[in-house]
Amino acid sequence: MSQPLESGPSPAASSFDYDERYLAGIVCFNRGDYFDAHEVWEVFWMDCSAADRRFIQSLIQAAVSLYHWANGNRAGADRLFHSGRRYMEPYRPRYHGLDIDRFWSQMETARASSEPGGMVNAPSIALEPPPAHWPAPPEVPHE
């Protein structure tokens, strides 16, 4: 597993070593495969450092919130949106390359611009600095 990354100003790109599971979850999330992103990040969450657990849990909840929203479950989407946002608050302004305020602003825009059961203006995760490479989309088994 990679070394934990620090909060605050980003060091030079060469010193960043993002965990492949973190990146694989982002690949799924950015494709709109929110359930798959949740599955990938959950595996990472079970193995990550204590300092990263709430951050990864917040990403999982954000992904599942969007999954519920797209399936018309507004109550589940709202609950996970708010708890995920709360869990990520201590990691502001930037953690593991993620601009946290920008991410949650995109989450709000997606919800405000679409009705439950649909998704308009889906959020997208960009990292700064960007990773040296993005993994291939993972094959996530569905039960």
Image (tube, grey):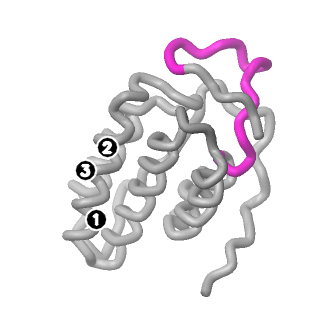
Q: Which mark is residue 85?
A: 2
Q: Residue at x 37, y 28 (%)?
A: 90
Q: Residue at x 75, y 30 (%)?
A: 17
CA distance separating discs 3 and 2: 5 Å
For badge 3, the amino acid type reads His
Disc with the residue nearer the chain's start (3 vs 1):
1
Is residue 4 depicted above or below 119 in this figure? above
Quarter holding the N terminus?
A: top right
Q: Which residue is mark 1?
A: 77
Circles 3 and 2 in contact, beta carbons < 8 Å:
yes
For badge 1, the amino acid type reads Ala
Q: Which residue is mark 3?
A: 82
Q: Position of residue 101 (x, y in %)?
A: 35, 31
Q: Nearer the viewer, residue 135 or 53?
A: 53
Q: Position of residue 93 (x, y in %)?
A: 41, 22
Q: Residue at x 35, y 41 (%)?
A: 87
Is residue 120 depicted above or below 142 in this figure? above
How crowded pointer 3 is (Cα within 10 Å; few <14, some 14-19, many 20+) is rated as some
Q: Residue at x 62, y 82 (%)?
A: 142
Which portion, as a residue range, is magenta? 7-22
Q: Position of residue 14 (x, y in %)?
A: 79, 19
User: Overall secondary structure of the magenta stretch?
Assistant: loop
- Farthest-out residue, bottom: 143
Q: Which mark is residue 65?
A: none
Q: Is residue 105 magenta?
A: no
